[in-house]
């Protein structure tokens, strides 16, 4: 009987505490962040509670808690510089009894296309197609054929994009095809816009 009395007293005390603070449990809206390498990320909850997240943060938590049963909707108000962040888990819900609010936001460096134009990639004297291989460092290879344009002029874009802030270096591989090909504007650092001004010029050897 003594145990039951103590338990009942504790329960009444808890109810009194809850009643004193409005009778609702409070919850922290929080989560995990992946790969946040740049500054500028701002999150907002329900469109009115903003949170600036510092560079390199691996987690976030809003200072303003919400009551049991209150809905939350965390959105990216401002993307970090040169990055795009999106939710790996749901970011919308309702605070539930004894269930912590957790979500995951993943960030990726923005990436852009790398390409340009080729001139002089013509078929051989025997009419057979000639190919040209372009490489961007050790990360991407592109093989082009003179069949693509009878005049030897064509546009090209590498299949792999280049992340913002990453260096690129395009070279033409000598394929012993009777052509000597040079590259202009082939090196640089990707920055906020696709590169489309690489010039590859091929002439007979």
Image: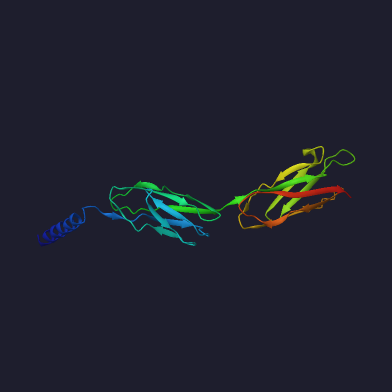
Q: In the rendering, at what x and y percent does residue 84 appear?
A: 52, 51
Residue 79 location (% of width, % of height): 50, 52
Which of the two residues, 105 or 50, is positioned nearer the viewer here?
50
Colour mapping? rainbow
Residue 130 found in image quarter: top right
Which residue sits furthest left? 1
Residue situated in front as seen by the camera: 52 or 18? 52
Q: Position of residue 184 (x, y in %)?
A: 77, 53
Quarter of the rendering containing residue 187: bottom right
Q: Residue 177, can we see it?
A: no
- The answer to whether 6 appears left or right of 144 in the picture is left
How many numbered callouts?
0
- Where residue 160 appears, x then y in whole percent? 65, 49
Residue located at (77% from left, 38% from top) = 148
Q: Residue furthest front?
A: 48
Q: Quadrant of residue 1?
A: bottom left
| Nearer to me, 41 or 88 | 41
Using the rendered image of the protein, determine whether residue 26 is visible from the camera's viewpoint: yes
Towards the viewer: 61 or 198: 198
């Amino acid at each position: 009987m003594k145990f039951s009395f103590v338990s009942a007293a504790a329960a009444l005390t808890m109810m009194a505490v809850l009643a004193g603070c409005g009778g609702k449990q409070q919850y922290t809206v929080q989560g995990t962040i992946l790969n946040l390498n740049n500054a500028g990320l701002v999150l907002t909850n329900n469109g009115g509670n903003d949170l600036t997240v510092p560079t390199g943060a691996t987690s976030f938590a809003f200072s303003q808690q919400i009551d049991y049963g209150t809905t939350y909707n965390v959105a990216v108000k401002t993307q970090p510089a040169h990055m795009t962040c999106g939710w790996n888990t749901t970011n919308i819900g309702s605070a539930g009894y004894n269930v912590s609010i957790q979500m995951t936001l993943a960030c990726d460096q923005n990436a852009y296309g790398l390409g340009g134009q080729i001139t002089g990639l013509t078929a051989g004297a025997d009419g057979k197609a000639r190919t040209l291989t372009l490489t961007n460092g050790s990360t991407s290879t592109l093989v082009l054929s003179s069949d693509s344009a009878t005049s030897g002029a064509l546009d090209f874009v590498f299949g792999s994009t280049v992340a913002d802030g990453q260096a690129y270096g395009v070279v033409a591989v000598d394929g012993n095809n009777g052509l000597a090909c040079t590259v202009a504007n082939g090196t640089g650092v990707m920055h906020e816009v696709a590169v489309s001004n690489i010039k590859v010029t091929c002439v007979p050897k």
